[in-house]
Image: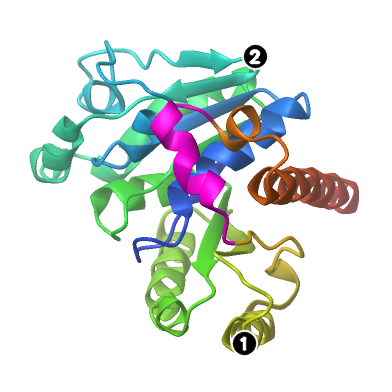
Amino acid sequence: MGKIIAISNHKGGVGKTTTTVNLGAGLAREGKKILLVDLDPQANLTQCFGITKPEATVYEALKGEEALNPVMVIENLYIAPSSLDLAGAEMELSSEAGREYLLDEILTPLKDDYDYLLVDCPPSLGLLTLNAFTCADEVIIPIQAHFLAIKGLTKIIEIINKVKRRINKTIEISGVVITLYDGRKVLHRDIEETIKTYFQEKVYNTKIRQNIALAEAPTRGEDIFRYSANSNGAFDYEKLSQEFIERHKEKKLKNN
């Protein structure tokens, strides 16, 4: 059965969507079957693959109007697209009974079809993110190597812990990915040490360096591997994908 992994940070500009896209593409290259779920009303994940007018989106699925119909991007990589209509979902669905379980009802039946379902959460801690945490097995938090990026982490940890106590007892923060990293800067190295002190072994050894190709790839509707296979961005996300797989192998062995 596949794992649902929420990729979340309520601070914008930390590389959340970039990580969802390129971790997903990297895992697909490693032979894993991946579903990317765009839960952000800005639909940046959808736009990263050049999808402008999807026939059915997460919005219709959440409202029960359409079945979720993933779109194949490349071999092993699929996306459940979003649209701006999702912006009104929090208000429209707020009176629904069991509103925090709506995404769970959609994604749980798909877990047998994929190895990993990566959910790109919006930069907020509202109803959509709560839905992601309710159905997720794990949460990965991308953190920019910047002082202000680590200041708001207490809130997201607090929300995840509340969800764990009240709704989803199996959810856990499984990883923290440092993004937009420049090892030449003392500040970035200091922030890395601060993050490691707090999250310890949860911090991925692979850091995502600042790389212009990562910003350019979405303009072509491509992941970093198709856009610039020899870039630092491609190298870093390939390493991250391999480390991700290795961590899950070790966890499976430990649980057995």
Q: What residue lies at 43% left-to-right and 76% top-to-bottom? A: 149
In this orientation, does residue 3 appear? no
* Residue 229, image quadrant: top right
Q: Position of residue 16 (x, y in %)?
A: 46, 53
For label 1, the residue is 194
Q: 192 or 116: which is nearer to us? A: 192
The image's mark for residue 75 is 2
Q: Residue at x 53, y 61 (%)?
A: 142
Q: Amino acid at mark 1?
A: Thr
Give the residue at x 90% y 47%: 253
Q: Which residues are magenta?
A: 210-222
What residue is at 40 percent from the left and 36 percent from the top?
A: 45
Secondary-structure class at tag 2: loop
Q: Would you say residue 235 is visible in this rendering?
A: yes
- Quadrant containing the N terminus is top right
- Pointer 2 local density, CA inside 10 Å: few below 14, some 14–19, many at least 20: few
